Image (spheres, rainbow, N blue to C red):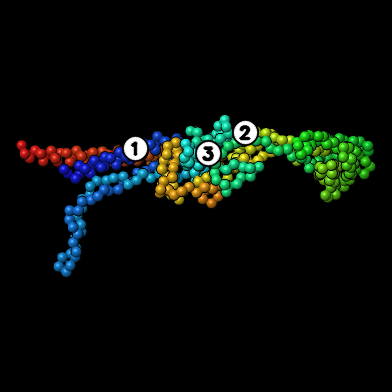
Amino acid sequence: MLRSLYSGISGLRSHQTMLDVTGNNIANVNTAGYKGSSVLFQDSLSQLIGNPGIPDDQVGGRNPAQVGLGVQVAGVRTNFAQGSAQATGRGGDLMISGDGFFAVRSGGETLYTRAGGFSFDPTGKMVTADGSIVQGWSAQNGVVNTGQAVGNIVLPLDAVAPARATTAATVTGNLPSTAAAGDTIVRDVTVYDAQGAPSTLSLTFTRTATGWNVTEPTSGATGSMTFTDGKQAAPGLTLTAGSVSIALGSVTGYATMSTVAVTDQNGAAAGTLKSYSITGDGSIVGTFSNGATQTLGKIAMATFANPEGLEKAGGTSYRPSVNSGVAQLGEAGQAGFGKLVSGNLEMSNVDLSQEFTNLIVAQRGFQANARIITTSDEVLQELTQLKR
């Protein structure tokens, strides 16, 4: 049979593979985290029909004469270029800006993905859309030890922020210098003990001939403030009421205004978890009902020496292969690892204009190779008709 016949068949097969890859790219144009693929061709073995000759004084050298035997697919390469960002506003949606993958656990196997559409299931596990569990490190008392082995990220839904005893309070505002001697102003503030039990701290401001006195009846603490051009001499009064240090250095003494108030105290009752947010380094930070914030865990990142060597496992996930190297785990934002952008998803990096061009190229290549087969068939037909 003619060699061209088999070359045309190999061309059909190879261009069909190109059509398959291009069609899959177009089908996944809106798949978050999808990375487009491209086909590389190479020629097949060539048949030697003329040996090379060695040049000498009488005859020049002769090049080898070879006829190719067709084409084959050398490989299907994955393009890991960054995809565009799509804002979603969901705190659980994460985009990797730079290199790296999320590690997820599915069916006893660790897979890797760029698709960061995460949520929490009823047990608090951080999961992907198909139920794979996101891997990372859990925090102990707000501290994450990234030196430990990674595990399932579980949001502690029953987490409690411990109570904080009040040790400091701040008073700001103005005491009116136009008040009559003996006038009083009372300001109350709620403070907490180490168990989170609230109590009321009452400050009584009394106008004197030279300024203002301040007392706290429960502890018996007392102090006085004098003003020069409406300001206290630095650093101003600090009143110690029991275990609470009350800073009054910012209080002024201008005319008319009576705006003095306790603006801050550092104690709090115990609090329950209300919401969470994810920072650029992958830390999951919980916000509690008492206003406290605490790190609850950190999402792990993975990189590979040769990402193109990863094997696609479906679900926009990859598994390591012998040519990808082993996963190197680390934290987002470190050297070699991209940062995380919360509230965004990485879209497919498929370029539709390029894919449709590839579709035309593959179609024309398929048609051209089909013509090789029909032409070879016509030649064979002529050959068989030599004997009538």
Q: Is residue 202 left or right of residue 343?
A: right
Q: Element under label 3?
A: strand
Q: Is residue 321 left or right of residue 273?
A: left
Q: Are marks 3 and 2 in contact (CB under 8 Å)?
A: no
Asked which quadrant contains residue 365, the reply is top left
Mark 2 and mark 1 lie on one chain; the one further toward the N terminus is: 1
Q: Which residue is mark 3?
A: 134
Mark 3 and mark 2 lie on one chain; the one further toward the N terminus is: 3
Q: Which residue is mark 1?
A: 20
What is the three-letter code of the residue carrying label 1?
A: Asp
Circle number at residue 157: 2
For the N terminus, give its image quadrant: top left
Circle number at residue 34: none
Q: Residue furthest left?
A: 388
Who is closer to the viewer here, 265 or 19? Answer: 265
* Badge 2: residue crowd in 10 Å (few <14, some 14–19, many ≥20): some
What is the three-letter code of the residue carrying label 2?
A: Leu
Which residue is painted at 33% across and 40% down in the image? 18
Q: Element under label 2?
A: loop
